[in-house]
């Protein structure tokens, strides 16, 4: 296991939708042998749970109460809702449009932060999300913020959805990303932002492998510095 002076490694990757952070984080974790922490999957699991229970997603108090009564967790990187694996259910395209209701809810955000930290205990991790480095793991030794040209981000997400069999149009993806950006960056609690000590990487024009290579070098350099 990689360690710095006996401490486990925390790698935090933040960025907007379509920046490539999910794929990059998962591949980087595989390369390093770290646990992959997908904070977005926790929000999706909570959203799925609320929809299943018929909770009014526009009612902030009802959402907070419903999520507090759920068990939302990550086990070996996969989302569980009340003890059942929901990794397939949380990737349904229609769910994506509803996550913003929970991600903007302060009480829900506190619960998700706690669940992510619990999942990371005892492991070196690669965590990705909107506030992985700013809020959930502020002491992470390596923090990065991935970004890309807006049109490139839309193209990536559109291609990803089409490959999964979703017939969504380019214009629909564009509008969805615009709404998500406005929600993530404009919310009062824990908005999407670049951590002061994060390295910003523009992934426009870069392959996934090139981005993963860059991050792997960052992590190994930090490990080397810690051993000196």
Image (cartoon, helix red, strand yellow):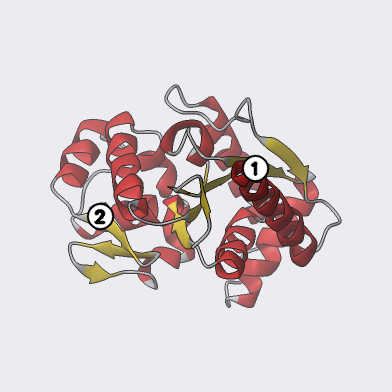
State left or right for residue 74 relative to residue 149. Answer: left
Q: Which image quarter is the C terminus in?
A: top right
Which residue occupies the foreground of this view, 172 or 142? 142
Mark 2 crowdedness (10 Å alpha carbons): few <14, some 14-19, many ≥20: many
In the displayed structure, does residue 3 sit left or right of residue 75?
Answer: right
**Residue lying at 65% horizontally and 68% vertically, measured from the top left:** 160
The disc at residue 169 is none
Q: Residue at x 29, y 49 (%)?
A: 118
Residue drawn 47% across the image and 26% down it: 187
User: In the image, 191: left or right of 204?
Assistant: left
Q: Among all residues in the image, which is located at the extreme right?
A: 205
Helix, strand or loop at mark 1: loop
Note whether residue 127 is visible: no
Above or below, 197 relative to 90: above
Left or right placement of residue 199 versus residue 63 in this view? right
Q: Secondary structure beneath disc 2?
A: strand
Q: In the image, which is nearer the foreground, mark 1 or mark 2?
A: 1
* Pick the front one: 108 or 158: 108
Q: CA distance from mark 1 to mark 2?
A: 40 Å
Query: Is residue 160 in sight in this rendering?
Result: yes
The residue at the point 49 percent across, 41 percent down is: 132
Q: What residue did someone put label 2 on?
A: 72
Mark 1 or 2 closer to N-term? 2
Residue at numbered disc 1: 228
Q: Nearer the viewer, residue 167 or 118?
A: 118
Q: Position of residue 212 (x, y in %)?
A: 71, 60
């Amino acid at each position: 296991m990689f360690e710095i002076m006996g401490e486990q490694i925390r790698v935090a990757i933040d960025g907007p939708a379509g920046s490539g952070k999910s794929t990059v984080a998962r591949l980087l974790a595989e390369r390093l042998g770290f646990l992959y922490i997908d904070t977005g999957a926790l929000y999706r699991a909570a959203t799925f749970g609320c929809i299943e229970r018929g909770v009014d997603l526009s009612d902030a108090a009802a959402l907070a109460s419903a999520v507090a009564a759920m068990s939302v967790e990550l086990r070996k990187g996969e989302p569980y809702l009340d003890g059942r694996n929901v990794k397939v259910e949380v990737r349904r395209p229609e769910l994506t449009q509803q996550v913003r209701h929970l991600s903007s809810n302060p009480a829900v955000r506190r619960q998700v932060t706690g669940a992510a930290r619990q999942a990371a205990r005892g492991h070196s991790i690669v965590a990705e999300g909107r506030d992985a480095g700013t809020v959930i793991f502020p002491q992470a030794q390596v923090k990065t913020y991935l970004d890309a040209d807006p049109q490139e981000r839309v193209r990536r997400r559109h291609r990803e959805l089409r490959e999964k069999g979703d017939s969504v149009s380019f214009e629909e993806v564009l509008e969805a990303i615009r709404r998500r950006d406005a929600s993530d960056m404009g919310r009062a609690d824990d908005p999407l932002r670049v951590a002061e000590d994060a390295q910003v990487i523009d992934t426009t024009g870069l392959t996934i492998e090139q981005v993963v290579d860059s991050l792997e070098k960052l992590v190994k350099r930090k490990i080397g510095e810690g051993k000196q």
